[in-house]
Structures are given as C-alpha cells and as structure tokens.
Image: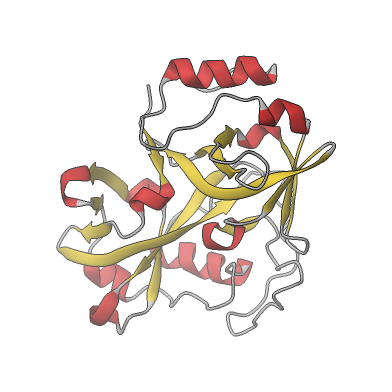
Amino acid sequence: MQELRKLESMSGYRLRARDGEIGKLKEIYFDDRHWSTRYFVVHTGSWLLGRDVLIVPSVITGVDESDWRLEVDLDLDQIRGCPPVEKAMPVSLHYEQEYHRYYGWEPYWTGDPLFTPGPAMPPSTVSEPHHEPPHPHLRSSDEVTGYSIHARDGQIGQIEDFILEEVDWKIAWLELDTRKWLPGKNVLLAPGWIEQVSWTAKEVTVDLNVESIKTAPAYDASEPISRDYELALYRHYGMTFDRQ
C-alpha cells in the first residue's frame, strides 16, 4: 500500500540536494485534470536571496520523517542556474517550457492529447487574479485551499487539505471541511468524483449529492488512512476503488 501524506503536515519540510540544503516546502502546483503534483514550490531562504524554486516530483528520492526532510537528486549549482520562478500564479506555459529546457527533461505534457494550455505568455506577464490563467489546469495548492465544494444539490464545505501518494505524489484525496454544515466533521473526497474546478468562482463541483457527503465516514486526521477506510469511502459513495 502506498504511503499517504497530508500536504499541510509536509509544509515546512526541508529539501536537501546532493550537496546541501535547498530550502523549505511551501506548496505544490498540480494539474486539476490528472490530479498529479507537477512541482514542489520551495522557498530557498538566504542562499538564493529568498527566491522560490520549482522541484519536479521525479527527483524526490526519499522522505525522512524524523528530520522533516525530502531528499532531492539535484546539485545546488543546477538549482542556482534554474530560471527564476514567476510571481504570477500559476506559472505560465512559457516558464514551464524554459524550465524543462534548462534541465533537459521531457515536459510532462508531451504526448497528452488533452493538453490545451492556450497561448504562451512571457514570464513578466502577470495574470489578473480573477481571470483564467494561460495554463488553466495548473493550480496552486495555496490558491485552491479554501475553495468551496458544491454538490449536485448545494454547497457542503470547502477544501482544507490535500492527501498525497508518496510514490508518484498524485493527489489521492481532498480533505473537506464541513464545519458550517456538520460541526466537528471532516470528510474525504477522491479527485475522480470532481466534475469541474472554477478559477473565477473559486469553487469545486462534485458529482455527488449533499446527503451522501453528510453521511460519509468521518476523517480523523490524527489517524493514518487505512486501506479499509478507503474501501469504506468508495462503498459509501457507490464508487469502484481504482487505486493500487
């Protein structure tokens, strides 16, 4: 069974390159169609004048829980020479192209027939906060945290956290805060049940009804997520379990 990790619990983890410390994890950028983490956003601190850098999940080689650390298969000089990340959220296609070209990596969207990001924009272009960005499927976890959750028949909560699979860092679950509707109860929703993410309305629409979410097995963040619990959630929602 794959290890599942709360993103909030990983915030502040230190990332260490082969020859030294890079900085601390701030957030992730993820693709809201495949629900895959595309980049870890790392604040470098004083060694790079406090700028942020992006680290792709494929170079994460290990997790040290005792030291709150992620091991990264890169050198500090490689990271130092990487194009500076944009302030606009999320990053533009232009920056992603430059980033992958710098490292000599194949872009993750190569061969994806569904990838239609729209026109590339120069790094200096800042997207207006209430309009769709040039890459409409690349999302910031900080931005999406707090988005409202709408079922078929009404609103039922907001996104509080993301549960990640350690092996490939896909988003396995969204933690839903329902305190305004169900005091003291949080529940989990699988990304596959989401129909739409609206950047402009700051909301997520799920193909479920309010009652099914209200009566779902409660999520206790102090306990590990077991396979039995995951299976119980899928059975409750009438879905087929589709993860290894």
- Dividing the image into 4 quarters, which one contains the N terminus? top left
**Residue 240 at least partly seen:** no
One can see residue 182 in this view: yes
Residue 163, position as x, y percentages in the image: 47, 40
For residue 156, side relative to residue 25 (left or right)? right
- Residue at 75% x, 28% y is 211
Q: Position of residue 235 (x, y in %)?
A: 62, 14
Q: Which residue extends farthest right?
A: 153
Nearest the eye: 42 or 106: 42
Structure colour scheme: secondary structure
Q: Residue at x 29, y 68 (%)?
A: 78
149 w.r.t. 49: above or below: above
Quarter assignment of residue 118: bottom right
Say whether residue 127 is left or right of residue 47.
Answer: right
**In the rendered view, would you say 44 is above or below 15?**
below
Q: Along the horizontal axis of the image, is 139 left or right of 13?
A: right
* Identity of the residue drawn at 73% across and 61% down: 199
Q: Which residue is found at the position 19% from the left and 65% from the top? A: 21
Residue 232 figure quarter: top right
Please provide percent x and percent y for residue 200.
77, 64
Q: Nearer the viewer, residue 217 or 33?
A: 217
Count of labels in the image: 0
- Residue 114 percent coordinates (x, y): 73, 45
The image shows residue 180, relative to residue 5, as above or below, that is: below
